[in-house]
Image (cartoon, rainbow, N blue to C red):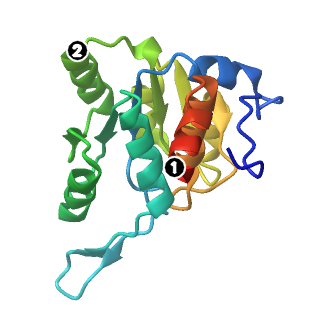
Amino acid sequence: MPSAFNTHNTNPLSDHPQAWERASNVKLLVLDVDGVLTNGQVRIGADGKESLKVFDIQDGLGIKLLEKCNIPTAVITGRNSKMVLARCDELGIKHVHMGVENKALALEGVLKSLGIQASDCAVMGDDWPDLAMMKNAGLRIAPAQAHEAVKEFVHLVTKREGGNSAVREVCDLILKAQNRYAELLIQASQ
């Protein structure tokens, strides 16, 4: 193993020890889209339709690494978007719920289908519509630019903003807390 890799599974969250412990129990990652997987900006074209969403490539790899460790990802969003559907398909995300008004109810359906308890999932959201979905999650996370009310409600606020590797930060945390990060990094370097 190259000595340049720090593969120690030390807790990088000394100021948030509960997040490290909670991450060690995560069996499902649930994500909002706008403001979490993207920076939250919505571009509307001349035809009045959404014309562009920008996704972070490192977030995508983090999601794939979780899947490799049998930790699926679900997407629950209030908006409908072909771009989101295409990105989720590309990443192999099977649980995609768009145009959802009651995100908590959608999450209940995902949990039931997977046989997972809310306490075994991590939920990442950035604004008020995400609060009910986050309520019973074992690990509640907000990206750095999230609304202040959401930041006050979560166990962890990421250092990075949504659409700028915030999801990857969460994926790495889960992998490190579950002692899988080093193994995956070594595999990637071979």
The quarter of the image holding the N terminus is top right
Amino acid type at circle 2 is Lys
Looking at the picture, how far across and down is residue 90, in whole percent?
A: 24, 56
The image shows residue 25, relative to residue 73, as above or below, that is: above
Q: Label 1 vs label 2: CA separation?
A: 34 Å
Q: Which mark is residue 18?
A: none
In the foreground, 100 or 158: 158
The image shows residue 159, relative to residue 16, as above or below, that is: below
Looking at the picture, how far across and down is residue 149, in whole percent?
A: 61, 38
Amino acid type at circle 1 is Ala
The answer to whether residue 46 is left or right of residue 133 is left
Residue 142 visible somewhere in the drawing:
no
Q: Quadrant of residue 183?
A: top right
Residue topped by disc 2:
112
Residue at position x 64%, y 54% in the image:
160
Q: Quadrant of residue 181?
A: top right
Q: Which mark is residue 188?
A: 1
Crowding near pointer 1: few (<14 within 10 Å), some, many (20+)?
Answer: few
